[in-house]
Every structure is written in C-alpha cells, then in structure tokens.
Amino acid sequence: MAEPFTVRLTFYGDVGFFLKRGAGTVIQRQLRERTAVKDVIESCGVPHPEVDLILIENEPVTFGYVLEQDTDVSVYPVGLDWVTVFPENHFQTPHLKQFIADCHLGKLVRNLRLLGIDVDYNPQGEDRQLLEAMRSDNRALLTRDRRLLMHAVVRHGCYLRSQDPLEQTTEVLRRFDLLTSLAPFTRCLRCNASLEPVEKAKILHQLEPLTKIYYEQFHRCIGCGQLYWPGSHFKKLEARVWKLSHQA
C-alpha cells in the first residue's frame, strides 16, 4: 500500500464562502494515491468554476496537476483584485456575455433579459439537457446547485450566493463585468431572442382596441413574435432597470 501524504490547501477570498469559515481557511487532506488537484479542491466543496488560480510553491498549475507527495496548495477565487500575478494562468474569463440558467432561477433570468443580457432558460429542462445546451452554445452556467457546477463539462459558471433575485442580478453583473454591456428593452423576456421595431400598420389586427388608440411605437420578438410597447407598466420596468444597473 502506498504511503499516505498530506495536502494542505489554503483558500483565499470569496471561495471561503463554500467552506463556511471565511477567507484564509486552511484544510488538510490525507491521500493514499495520486490525485488531480481539481478533485481535491472540489472534495472540499469548492466548484472548479469558482477557482481562478492555483499556486503550488508560488508557481501556477492547471486543474489536472497531479498531487503525489506532501504539498501546500493556494487556491484563489475569481475577481480578487490583488491577484494580478500570472495573468496568463487564470482559468476564468471575466467578460462573458452569454449565459444559461438552471430551472430554479426564473426571476433572475427575467431581470437579466430585461437588461438585454443573453440568457438561455428552460424551466422544464433536466440537468442533462442544461449541460448539453451550455456546452454546445459555449455559455456560462448560472446556478445555486453546487454539484451541477462541479460537472467536468462546465468550463465557466457562477454559484449565486444570494437567494434574492435582485441580489443575484447584481452578483452576475459584477462577476462578469457586464455594466458596460447593458442594453435594456432589446431582448424578449419570454424566449430571449432580440426585439426589432415593427410598424403599427403591420400588427394592427393583433392589438386591443385601446392599444390601437393610445400607442404608436411597437417592437416584435424575432423569435416568438411577442409584441412589446411602452404601456402602463413601462415606468415600473424603467424603475427596475435603473435599480438593477445602479445597485451593481
């Protein structure tokens, strides 16, 4: 039987959230066989998309680096401002603009689409379908399912800390630096496709009598055909957009 060896992992910054002990947490693991550092990190409860840099003896290593002797491992999160060393060895891409959300995040999806952010979402979708769509479309996964985020096929993603949709929206905007990419009222809240202006005369037969009288500007979803116009609810939506974009 192989001699056991000890791996000492120090978790910095926000990855301490997953350990319930805060930043600077140290965890020791005794191993009896060669093991990839990714597997050891995830055995501590930290999904790999939440890890941006791994250092061993002050040198960067990949997730596939094999541990086979007593080793000190430093694990750094996404977005830690002072981690500017080895920029070419960071795992995560900070400026992603295409996402897919799991079936429990409908309110977050609506907020993001309202801001013009591309978010695929199927409220009846199973995990297998979700992961396949994520992989084929090269989207970042948004979820509160830690195990789902640990799937090997997941390259980029985010575990949402809050259960509140407004706070979750802020998390996504900050994590992926999206504030300069917002384009409110340009995406269908129902199916995620883009909206295009449409002449009133072409859709007159679809409008209710009062809508025909009081509104002149309309947009139509290029995907599902849903119509949008600045009705009585529009000021509330504008207020929500302002709150979402200024809170981040």
Image: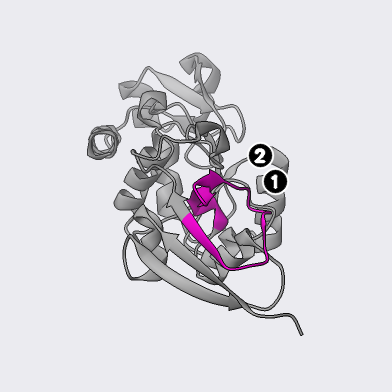
Q: Nearer the viewer, residue 139 or 104?
A: 139
Residue 67 falls within the magenta-colored stretch: yes
Q: Which residue position is annotated with label 1?
A: 135
Q: How is the image coloured?
A: one colour
Image side of residue 141 versus residue 138, left or right: left
Cβ–Cβ below 8 Å for labels 2 and 1? yes
> Residue at point 36% right, 47% down?
171
Q: Is 87 in front, or is 245? A: 87
For this orientation, the residue located farthest to the bottom is 1
Task: For mark 1, give the secondary structure.
Answer: helix
Q: Is residue 73 visible?
A: yes
Q: Quadrant of the N terminus?
A: bottom right
Would residue 193 appear left or right of 75 to someone viewing this image? right
Q: Is residue 124 visible?
A: no
Residue drawn 36% across the image and 51% down it: 168
- Residue 127: percent from the left, percent from the top? 65, 62
Tell me: residue 219, above or below residue 27. above
Q: Residues within 10 Å of mark 2 (few under 14, many from 20)?
A: some
Mark number, residue 228? none
Instruction: Give the percent coordinates (x, y) of residue 220.
Output: 52, 26
The type of residue carrying mark 2 is: Asn
- The amino acid beneath tag 1 is Arg
Q: Which residue is nearer to you in this view: 57 or 136?
A: 57
Cα separation between marks 2 and 1: 5 Å
Secondary structure beneath dot 2 equals loop
In this view, 231 is above or below 133: above
- List the residue tagged with mark 2: 138
Pick whichever, 223 or 99, lies toward us. 99
Magenta-drawn segment? 48-74
Q: Is residue 174 above or below residue 104?
A: above
